[in-house]
């Protein structure tokens, strides 16, 4: 079992890049973590205030890059990779205009499918067009699939088309954004996880410590049993 949280899911409780956040997720029993670095400043904070020791105990560590990625961002990511050795660096493909710049960096990039609000990278055909330009891995975001197709057939299509590329799962409920699954009870979202051996990152927004504890236990017990 590789199950954990995005640190951004706890942003109302802890700073996403903080020892307090990391320690709390360890205490929950998470063995997987995705660092939410949505700005260059947060990557700099990681570089200047954190060490690999701060992330000890997590078996799988990924980093979610800023939505807007510049050459300076990529330089910072290269520095962070040399220190923390992330399994994945997750990027939002809908904001990228020039994929050539990414090929200059030897980093473990993965793109994720986008939600209903975006114009690109929501469906199989638009993702395939990106992979033809930039050969990388994929993170399957099941919340995003649901926003575009509540039947979740879209998720099945993505697994069928990109199964060899999919290396991580994002999961959360959906009413308007990233709601708690233990409250929405949207089992169809979790049932779309066909490979439970992949790292699974919970992105449900937690307002309290109790929310985070309940969400982790709910997802863990449903997917893996008590």
Image (cartoon, helix red, strand yellow):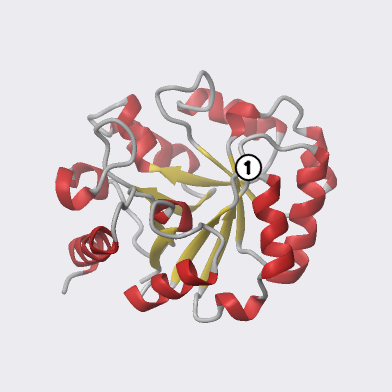
Indicate the quadrant containing the C terminus: top left, top right, bottom left or bottom right. Answer: bottom left
Q: Quadrant of residue 88?
A: bottom right
Please, what secondary structure does the residue beneath circle 1 have?
loop
Tell me if residue 8 can be seen: yes
In the picture, measured across the screen, residue 59 lies left or right of residue 174, that is right
* Residue 153 position in % (x across, y down): 29, 32
In the picture, measured across the screen, residue 190 lies left or right of residue 93, that is left
Identify the residue at horizontal 69%, vertical 49% (top origin).
41
* Residue 162 position in % (x across, y down): 49, 41
Q: Is residue 162 above or below residue 108?
A: above
* Residue 44 position in % (x across, y down): 72, 56
Tell me if residue 108 can be seen: no
The residue pinned by badge 1 equals 66
Indicate the quadrant containing the N terminus: top left, top right, bottom left or bottom right. Answer: bottom left
Q: Quadrant of residue 218?
A: bottom left
Q: Is residue 22 above or below residue 170?
A: below
């Amino acid at each position: 079992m590789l199950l954990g949280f995005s640190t951004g899911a706890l942003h109302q409780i802890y700073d996403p890049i903080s020892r307090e956040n990391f320690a709390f997720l360890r205490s929950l029993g998470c063995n997987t973590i995705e660092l939410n670095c949505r700005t260059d400043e947060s990557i700099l904070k990681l570089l200047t205030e954190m060490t690999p020791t701060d992330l000890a105990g997590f078996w799988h560590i990924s980093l979610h890059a800023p939505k807007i990625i510049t050459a300076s961002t990529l330089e910072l990511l290269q520095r962070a990779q040399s220190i923390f050795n992330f399994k994945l660096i997750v990027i939002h493909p809908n904001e990228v205009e020039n994929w050539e710049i990414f090929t200059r960096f030897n980093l473990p990039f993965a793109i994720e499918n986008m939600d209903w609000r975006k114009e690109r990278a929501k469906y199989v055909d638009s993702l395939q067009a990106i992979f033809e330009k930039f050969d990388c891995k994929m993170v399957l975001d099941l919340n995003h699939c649901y926003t575009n197709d509540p039947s979740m057939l879209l998720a099945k299509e993505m697994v069928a088309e990109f199964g060899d590329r999919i290396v991580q799962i994002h999961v959360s409920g959906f009413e308007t954004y990233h709601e708690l699954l233990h409250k929405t009870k949207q089992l169809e979202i979790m049932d779309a996880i066909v490979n439970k051996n992949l790292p699974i990152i919970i992105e449900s927004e937690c307002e309290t410590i109790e929310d985070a504890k309940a969400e982790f236990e709910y997802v863990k017990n449903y997917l893996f049993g008590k």
